[in-house]
Image (spheres, rainbow, N blue to C red):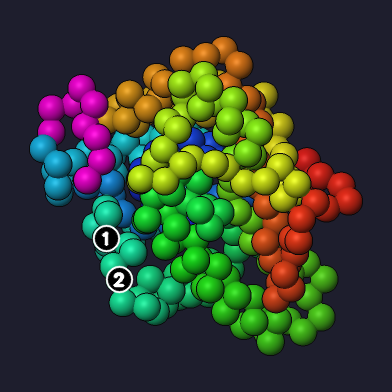
């Protein structure tokens, strides 16, 4: 049985970014686990009457666990960090925690944010770099243990193509700027993998609707009928084992991890 591990920063990242992919591979029999860097204590509260801080973190944790049931997640692990603080952590702190988790879980595929964090969020960006480093260390350890591994682990970056990003900005789904920087997406030529999630679109939406505190973002996400992110999810293959995998456009865009 193959194992997929997703590493994201906040409750709801998993559903927005890779909800359909998670559901698809869980349905196919993979074990799909999630590491969440924070409990989203500094996020929006929507119509839920709760104060920001630990109380909100408890609510968002519960929301994520309900969304996880919908998506088919086998296990959710929360790291002991507060929302908005990941970029301030001592170098090596988050990385060590992730290396330990990867060594324990032994995933075949790892998914995290692309290095711009998709939305420029500092927590997303930090977790992208931390996960990349941890994956590289895990891949080295796995190669040492299995020198002739015919199926080395893979690292993927979840992303939004530049062309899709421009369209969603024009339609008011994405803001033109986020965290004081333009919301750009990644160059289309860097997309290595497009997962068709049409069969799981309703599952993705159901999972997103479990995040009641984020209902404003969810409603905006579904405010147009033609949000392609509701039926396709995009990734860049970053590493295969210890080998760098992407440099511009691949010869063929894959439809599977």
- Mark 1 is surrounded, within 10 Å at the Cα level, by few (under 14), some (14 to 19) or many (20 or more) other residues, namely some
Determine whether 111 is above or below 212 in the image. Answer: below
In the image, 254 versus 102, the foreground residue is: 254
Q: Which residues are magenta?
A: 42-50
Locate residue 232, reporting x and y percent. 66, 31
Q: Which residue of the protein is positioned furthest toward the top in this rendering?
A: 225
Q: Which residue appears farthest toward the right when viewing the image?
A: 251
Q: Do tag 2 and tag 1 residues touch (Cβ < 8 Å)?
A: yes
- Residue bearing mark 1: 85
* Residue at (52% x, 73% y) in the render: 134
Residue 197: image quadrant is top right
Residue 89's label in the rendered image is 2
Q: Is residue 43 magenta?
A: yes
Image coords of residue 253 (percent x, y)? 81, 44
Quadrant in the picture for residue 217: top left
- Up/down of 181 relative to 81, above or below: above
Establish if 199 lies above or below 84.
above
Label 2 Cα crowd, 10 Å radius (few <14 / some 14-19 / many 20+): few
- What is the number of the mark on residue 170? none
Q: CA distance from mark 2 to mark 1?
A: 7 Å
Which residue is at 83% across, 53% downward? Answer: 250
Q: In the figure, is residue 174 to the left or right of 138?
A: left
Q: Is residue 148 above or below residue 183?
A: below
Nearer to the camera, 234 or 28: 234
Question: What element does badge 2 sit on?
Answer: loop
Q: Viewed as shown, does residue 114 lie left or right of 191?
A: left
Query: Where in the figure is residue 31, as x and y percent of width and height?
Result: 59, 51
- Please state the total of marks drawn on the protein image: 2
Q: Main secondary structure of the magenta part?
A: loop
């Amino acid at each position: 049985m193959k194992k997929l591990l997703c590493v994201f920063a906040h409750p709801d990242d998993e559903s927005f970014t890779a909800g359909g992919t998670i559901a698809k591979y869980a349905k196919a029999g993979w074990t799909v686990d999630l590491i969440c860097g924070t409990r989203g204590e500094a996020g929006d509260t929507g119509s839920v009457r709760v104060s920001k801080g630990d109380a909100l973190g408890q609510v968002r944790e519960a929301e994520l666990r309900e969304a996880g049931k919908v998506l088919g997640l086998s296990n959710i692990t929360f790291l002991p960090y507060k929302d908005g603080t990941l970029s301030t952590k001592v170098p090596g702190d988050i990385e060590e925690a992730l290396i330990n988790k990867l060594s324990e879980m032994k995933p075949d595929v790892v998914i995290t944010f692309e290095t711009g964090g998709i939305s420029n969020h500092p927590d997303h960006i930090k977790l992208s770099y931390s996960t990349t480093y941890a994956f590289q260390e895990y891949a080295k350890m796995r190669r040492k243990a299995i020198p002739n591994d015919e199926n080395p682990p893979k690292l993927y970056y979840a992303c939004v193509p530049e062309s899709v990003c421009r369209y969603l900005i024009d339609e008011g789904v994405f803001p033109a700027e986020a965290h004081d920087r333009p919301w750009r997406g990644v160059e289309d030529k860097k997309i290595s993998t497009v997962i068709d999630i049409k069969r799981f679109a309703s599952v993705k939406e159901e999972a997103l609707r479990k995040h009641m505190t984020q209902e404003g973002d969810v409603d905006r996400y579904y405010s147009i009928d033609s949000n392609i992110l509701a039926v396709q999810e995009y990734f860049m293959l970053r590493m295969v084992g210890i080998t760098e995998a992407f440099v511009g456009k691949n010869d063929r865009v894959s439809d599977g991890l």
